[in-house]
Amino acid sequence: MRFASRGDLDGGLAAAGRKPAAPRLYVLDGLRIVAALMVVFFHYVALRGGWGEDPERVFPNLWKFAQYGWTGVEVFFLISGFVICMSTWGRSLGDFFVSRVTRVYPAYWVAIFLTAAVVSLWPQVRQINGGFEGVLTNLTMLQSGLGVWDVDGVYWTLFIELKFYVMFAVVVATGVTYRKCVLFCAVWTVVALASVQADIKVLDQWAMPLYQPYFVAGIAFYLMYRYRPTALLWGITAMSLLLAEHHITKRVADNTTHNIPAWPARVIVFVAFVLMALIACGVFNRIQWRWLSTAGALTYPLYLLHQYIGMTVIYGLRDRVPRHLLVAGLVLVMLCAAWLMHKFVEKPLSTKLRKVLRASLDEMRQHTPRKGAPAKAAAPAAAAPVAPSAVPEQHAGREEAREGAAVAQRLRAYETGTYEQPAGDKVIVGRPDGV
């Protein structure tokens, strides 16, 4: 295998004459927390939620800005394509499975029970549809595929992420390379376009035409960052941007009951693409603010906890606390709750779950003979002389193995420090009244 086909330890930049990439993209953490706060702002200010009246009357000025906060979800998907492609390079399918399960499930399980408890005790704002059985089904994170209501309205995006993981796992299983990533982007784009006119529900559910452009663009941006920007990659991102902008009109209609213009949402999406392009070109590599790592770590717990619990708190305090102070204080409380969940729930549970899953995979591999391997070990034969021409290739193979292990270790360190992160008639982020 050619060295250039898989990238080198510094992200493929040294060979191109550029400076090595920063060991950690702290700016991605900052962009994630901004996206999360956009969604929180949308839920607390632009939805009826616990206010019990039109939010335009409650926040006549803030509402004009908050009504576009749902675009934070699009930013999440854009970042996800970048991070998933980065974190799978040089790793096996088993490693990918372990990293995703330990990243998304521990905090999610705890958030389900906390949200279900709050909504069950104070059902004035929301109720648990499907009862305890529905809560148990939500633990799988597959409830959207089974037609079961989400315990919290934000969970619909997690099913979108899972489907992306499943599809990209095909690339991981065969070995992530530059060419395979580009082919994956091209095939997914074509299938997503076909699903719009095919009117086949299953195809539409998996092709996800509304969100596919963001994941694909994120993958292309990472290829730019790992290697270098090329006309091909710029073409993929430009096509994705145009497709994303095309779907904005529908997304705006899904996210409000008011007749509002679509151009602010288009501008936000465009700015997000520009920021990711600058990240891909290494413009922000010098930003090494470590506090952004902590902020990024709060993103996922904050996203999981804030909506229904926050709406319930708003309902209980709306007549006692000034509305602007209530929103600001609630956001701070939710950030603290997110830190507590990350510190005392997410990190320890993820560590334990990771050990268990890795042990299980090791057990499976131990009892799975490799393809072409003999059933029993043969008796040792006399050592044959090694042809001089084979020595360099063996040495190169050992070098690649060591480099692959270094890449995997570095990416695993990046991942454990932070995130990573369909609607129909379900409760989703896009419905202003949560119905």
Image: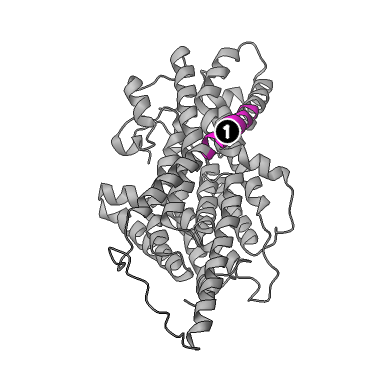
Q: Residue at x 47, y 54 (%)?
A: 215
Vertical side of 17 occupied by 433: above or below: above
| Colouring style | one colour
In magenta segment, residue 343: yes
- The residue beneath circle 1 is 302
Q: Residue at x 42, y 83 (%)?
A: 384
Q: Residue at x 57, y 61 (%)?
A: 407
- The reply to whether residue 67 is in sight is no
**SS at badge 1:** helix
Secondary structure mostly seen in the magenta stretch: helix
What type is the residue that disc 1 sits on?
Leu
Span highlighted in magenta in the image: 336-351
| The residue positioned farthest toward the top in the image shown | 320
Residue 189 drawn at (x, y percent) = 39, 61
The C terminus - image quarter: top left
Vertical side of 368 occupied by 48: above or below: above
Residue 52 drawn at (x, y percent) = 51, 18
Please state which of residues 92 and 311 is positioned toward the viewer in this rendering: 92
